Image (spheres, rainbow, N blue to C red):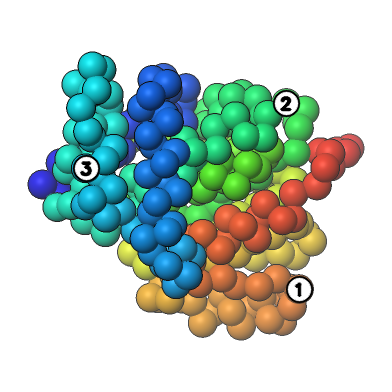
Amino acid sequence: MTDELQRLADDLAADYVHGRWRPEATEEHRARILSAQASVDAGLDGMSAGGVLAGESIEQMLRPHPKLDSWRLAPVLRAYPDGSAHAQALVRDLLDAIAVNGFPLLPPRPLRYVEAPARFGGHAPSLFLAGGITGCPDWQRRAVLQLDAIGSPAVVLNPRREHFPVGQADATREQVAWEYEHLRLADVILFWFCAEAVQPVALFELGAHAARGTRLAVGAHPEYPRRLDVLEQLRHARPDVTVHDSLRDTVHGAAAHLPAKPTPRP
């Protein structure tokens, strides 16, 4: 069931971020209650990790309703108890994003989301998700959901494509050019270094944009193999930048750096 929850949660979160799915009204109402209950069940310590979904709370979400069988959240929550920690965290992030949908009044997420190779015109404050892709879990999707959960107005620039044509040299050149351009367009760059890979390209980009004086929010998993290097390099080059331990704290730091208006570009 671990793989089943990951598959269901990945598909549903992707459809949410791309605007292909929104919960039905009662499904959304119950999701909001479940999100709030997760924070209550977690207590003060668990709230910082995104809450805890208790079995009793899930049962309340899945109590009989005429449209229950058509709710896409239903199979996700049924698979939740046997899922991996990563998959469960993604589900909680999705519920938190749904809980604040429309509060405050922001444009729909698809209007505040640019995924490579689509282009961004620089019309609103923007945030680039920099960090590992190859060999890394899809932390970018979780970051988008976490930004929604705190009502951030940022236009998210995401280099991770939903479908990348691996092995096509032209696509790789296009990807590198897109990242180079949009890193320079972004008002804030969020760097997250997960534990699963060294991510040399992201390290290069961090060095380049730290030197440029760009607004940065940086986080490195406690088990990231080059975490000490990141800490020490930034201590010398950018002592103003805090290196966070969790993706959630890094997202909050990035949101705090977002300007009210996009930075003028030459």
Residue depth check, mark 1 versus mark 2: number of the one nearer the observer: 1
Q: Residues within 10 Å of mark 3 (few under 14, many from 20)?
A: few
- The residue identified by callout 2 is 121
Residue in the image at 51% along x and 82% along y: 228
Give SS at disc 3: helix
For the question of whether residue 169 can be seen, the reply is: no
Give SS at disc 1: loop
Taking depth in this image into account, of 122 and 246 the one nearest to the observer is 246
CA distance separating discs 1 and 2: 29 Å
- The residue identified by callout 1 is 240
Instruction: Kindly give the residue lying farthest to the left in the view shown.
Output: 1
Q: Residues within 10 Å of mark 2 (few under 14, many from 20)?
A: few
Q: Is residue 196 above or below residue 124?
A: below
| Quarter that holds the C terminus | top right
Residue in the image at 84% along x and 39% along y: 261
Q: Residues within 10 Å of mark 1 (few under 14, many from 20)?
A: few
For residue 114, side relative to residue 212 (left or right): left
CA distance separating discs 3 and 2: 45 Å
Query: x, y percentage for residue 105?
Result: 68, 29
Give the mark nearest the N terminus, 3 or 2: 3
CA distance separating discs 1 and 3: 46 Å
The label on residue 59 is 3
Residue depth check, mark 3 versus mark 2: number of the one nearer the observer: 3
